[in-house]
Image (cartoon, rainbow, N blue to C red):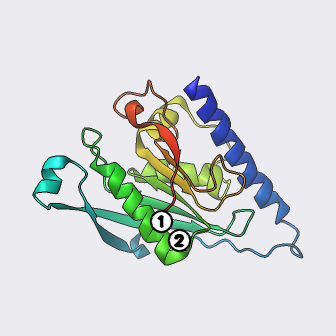
């Protein structure tokens, strides 16, 4: 049942992005522009300090480092918000610290770019590229293969939509949005929640 609900939600979001992008094709109505960074060597790598969520690490005041790159930035949300496709270091699914790292990254983006944003977070460049071509610039032109769907389930770490009136929540955070509870390694984390950045 969860898989069915997540598929419907992802389909509705994709439809909203598609309808929003088609409504902007009339140049007299187009108030947004598409900005993409297609040069892999020109992306900025940023390190964000985050507190590790495990009790042992917290007691020792250890800090983890989350490295990320904004690969694409696209102003294509129907409400004028910007979507960011972000690449992070590989996630260790045996440790829940990545969930705090993701939330800290979202908080950082909201402080820097505003609340009306979407953030798609991946830990594999190839999966990010396919997702961008499928939903970002709509250039993929074909359905995903089974192998691509399997990789997507594991490496599409999180999706955040801020101040999106058509979302399940006004501020939605989905962990492993392409996975379901039966997905090996990451299924236990697949979930959606209301998340209001600090």
CB contact under 8 Å: marks 2 and 1: yes
Q: Which residue is mark 1?
A: 71
In the displayed structure image, the side of residue 137 where residue 172 appears, left or right: left
Counting from the top left corner in percent of width and height, residue 142 is at 66, 40
**Residue in the picture at 62% in, 68% down:** 116
Question: Considering depth in this image, is 187 or 103 the residue closer to the camera?
Answer: 103
Which of the 4 image quadrants contains residue 3? Answer: top right
Alpha-carbon span between mark 2 and mark 1: 6 Å
Q: What is the quadrant of residue 181 in the picture?
A: top left
Considering the image in quadrants, where does the C terminus appear?
A: bottom left
Callout 2 crowding tier (Cα within 10 Å): few <14, some 14–19, many ≥20: few
The answer to whether residue 74 of the structure is visible from this angle is yes
Q: Secondary structure at mark 1?
A: strand
Residue in the foreground of this view, choosing between 54 and 112: 54
Residue 73: quadrant of the picture: bottom right
Q: Which residue is mark 2?
A: 37
Image: 26 above or below 155: below
Helix, strand or loop status at disc 2: loop
Closer to us: 169 or 46: 169
Where residue 118 sits in the image (x, y, percent)? 58, 61
* Residue projecting furthest to the left: 60
Q: Residue at x 42, y 70 (%)?
A: 108
Instruction: Give the residue at x 25% y 42%.
Output: 95
């Amino acid at each position: 049942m969860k898989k069915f609900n997540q598929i419907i939600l992802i389909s509705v979001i994709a439809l909203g992005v598609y309808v929003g992008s088609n409504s902007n094709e009339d140049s007299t109505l187009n108030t947004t522009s598409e900005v993409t960074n297609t040069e892999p060597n020109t992306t900025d790598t940023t390190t964000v300090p985050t507190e590790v969520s495990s009790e042992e690490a917290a007691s020792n005041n250890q800090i983890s480092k989350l490295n990320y790159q904004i690969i694409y930035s696209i102003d294509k949300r129907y409400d004028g918000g910007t979507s960011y496709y972000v690449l992070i270091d590989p996630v260790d699914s045996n440790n829940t610290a990545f969930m705090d790292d993701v939330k800290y990254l979202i908080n950082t983006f909201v402080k820097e770019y505003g609340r009306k944003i979407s953030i798609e977070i991946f830990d594999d460049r190839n999966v990010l590229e396919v997702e961008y071509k499928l939903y970002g610039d709509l250039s993929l032109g074909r359905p995903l293969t089974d192998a691509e769907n399997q990789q997507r389930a594991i490496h599409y770490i999180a999706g955040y939509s801020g101040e999106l009136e058509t979302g399940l929540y006004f501020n939605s955070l989905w962990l492993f949005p392409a996975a379901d509870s039966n997905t090996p390694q990451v299924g236990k984390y697949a979930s959606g929640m209301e998340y209001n950045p600090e």
